[in-house]
Amino acid sequence: MSSRTINGPATISVQGEHYAETIYFLVDRFYDNMDLAQTNCVVHYVIGNKSYVYAVPFCDVRSYDGKIIIPWSISMSATQESGTI
């Protein structure tokens, strides 16, 4: 199984907010001859010693040729405590 690590912005959201912010990742649509638009996408993140998964509900494959835009709506599980995600 392959995975990719994508670096996000230095600062996101405010502690305690719930779905108040969405971060968009712009990545190559194709990876090892696989069209990522034909797969399920999740954002896996770790806060302290807890691990979370956000199931991405949709991706944008029309705005940029050869690219895919992946949205991540920041939930309270990511903002419940201050710190590094």
Image: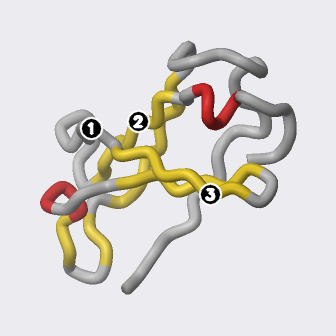
The location of residue 65, given as percent across then percent down, is 23, 48
Say if mark 3 contacts mark 2, CB within 8 Å: no
Q: Which residue is mark 3?
A: 51
* Amino acid at circle 3: Ser
Q: Does label 2 or label 1 sit earlier along the sequence?
A: 1
Look at 85% across and 32% down and name the residue there.
82
**Above or below: residue 65 compared with residue 57:** below
Q: Find residue 71 and name its label.
A: 2
Q: Does label 3 or label 2 sit earlier along the sequence?
A: 3
Say if mark 2 contacts mark 1, CB within 8 Å: yes
Q: Which residue is mark 1?
A: 57
Packing grade of label 3 (10 A; few <14, some 14-19, many >=20) is few
* Amino acid at circle 2: Pro
**Above or below: residue 52 compared with residue 24:** below
Packing grade of label 1 (10 A; few <14, some 14-19, many >=20) is few
Q: Secondary structure at mark 1?
A: loop
C-alpha span from label 2 to label 1: 8 Å
The location of residue 55, given as percent across then percent down, is 35, 46
Look at 47% across and 43% down and name the residue there.
25
C-alpha span from label 3 to label 2: 19 Å
Q: Secondary structure at mark 2?
A: strand
Look at 18% across and 55% down and name the residue there.
37
Look at 40% across and 36% down and name the residue there.
71
C-alpha span from label 1 to label 3: 19 Å
* Amino acid at circle 1: Pro
Q: With 72 as the anchor, is 18 left or right in this view?
A: right
Q: Nearer the viewer, mark 1 or mark 3?
A: 3
The location of residue 42, given as percent across then percent down, is 39, 54
